[in-house]
């Protein structure tokens, strides 16, 4: 049976004790359920291949209307929905299984990139007052982008998932925005995405 929303976050990595993306997801999911939505939450490992495999399996199992994958971007100043996933792995640090691919494709012979199918500009516009956010033009080349690309490739190539939309949101570290505030923002962005089929024509570009 199809569900409304699949949310994912990541386990800790690079020696950290927590991953703010999962902290936000695990707090947002019950709030969305209280508001009448059928929601599944999944914690993904910070591992190339494995994380994407688990996400693909979950999407096929639950057939959600919406998939929002979240990850940590520790150096960013706000909540940043991603515009595009690119078909490259180039790891600055090893993943949690020790893999450190360089200049490898996420999907062999896949297209260069995929755009998010979430209304990313409307989601940013809906952030609560005082919560920083912006559209991001790059999800990096680490496991976050890997999961994002695998998700968009799945949605683009599996006809059985034609009604599912998805994308990726990076969240900042807890010293920038506390996880409870990020969770509230995530709830609002999910609700906006569910009711917004066509994104708003707002400025969301960047000079660099």
Image (cartoon, helix red, strand yellow):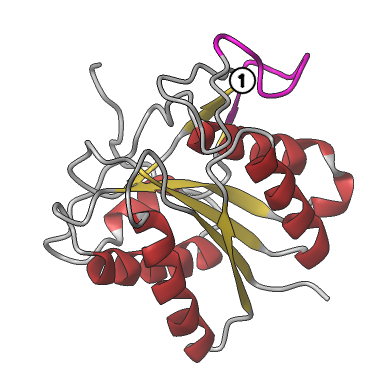
**Residue 163 appears anywhere in the view:** no
Q: Quadrant of residue 135?
A: top left
151 magenta-colored: no
The residue sitting at 70% across, 18% down in the picture is 111
Instruction: Tell me the residue at 49%/75% (across/down).
Output: 29
Camera-side residue of 97 and 131: 97
Query: Visible in this render: residue 91?
Result: yes
- SS type, badge 1: loop
Residue extent of the magenta highlight: 102-114
Residue found 80% across the figure and 52% down from its top: 161
Image x and y of residue 127, in percent: 27, 61
Q: Residue furthest top?
A: 103
**For this view, does 200 lie left or right of residue 69?**
left
- Pick the quarter of the image with the C terminus: top left
Closer to the camera in the image, 25 or 16: 16
Snapshot quadrant of residue 137: top left
Q: Is residue 42 left or right of residue 130?
A: right
**Residue under pointer 1:** 87
């Amino acid at each position: 049976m199809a569900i409304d929303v699949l949310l994912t976050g990541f386990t800790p990595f690079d020696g950290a004790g927590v991953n703010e993306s999962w902290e936000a997801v695990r707090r947002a999911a019950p709030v969305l359920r209280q508001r009448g939505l059928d929601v599944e939450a999944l914690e993904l490992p910070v591992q190339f291949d494995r994380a994407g495999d688990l996400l693909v399996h979950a999407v096929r199992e639950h057939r959600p209307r919406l998939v929002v994958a979240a990850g940590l971007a520790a150096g960013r100043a706000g909540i940043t929905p991603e515009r595009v996933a690119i078909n490259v792995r180039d790891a600055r640090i090893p993943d949690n299984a020790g893999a450190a691919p360089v200049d490898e494709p996420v999907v062999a012979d896949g297209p260069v990139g995929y755009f998010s199918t979430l209304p990313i500009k409307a989601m940013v516009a809906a952030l609560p007052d005082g919560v920083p956010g912006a559209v991001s033009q790059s999800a990096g080349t680490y496991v976050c982008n890997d999961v994002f690309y695998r998700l968009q490739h799945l949605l683009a190539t599996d006809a059985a998932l034609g009604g599912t939309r998805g994308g990726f949101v990076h969240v900042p570290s807890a010293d920038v925005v506390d996880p409870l505030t990020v969770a509230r923002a995530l709830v609002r962005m999910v609700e906006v995405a569910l009711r917004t089929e066509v994104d708003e024509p707002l400025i969301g570009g960047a000079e660099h």
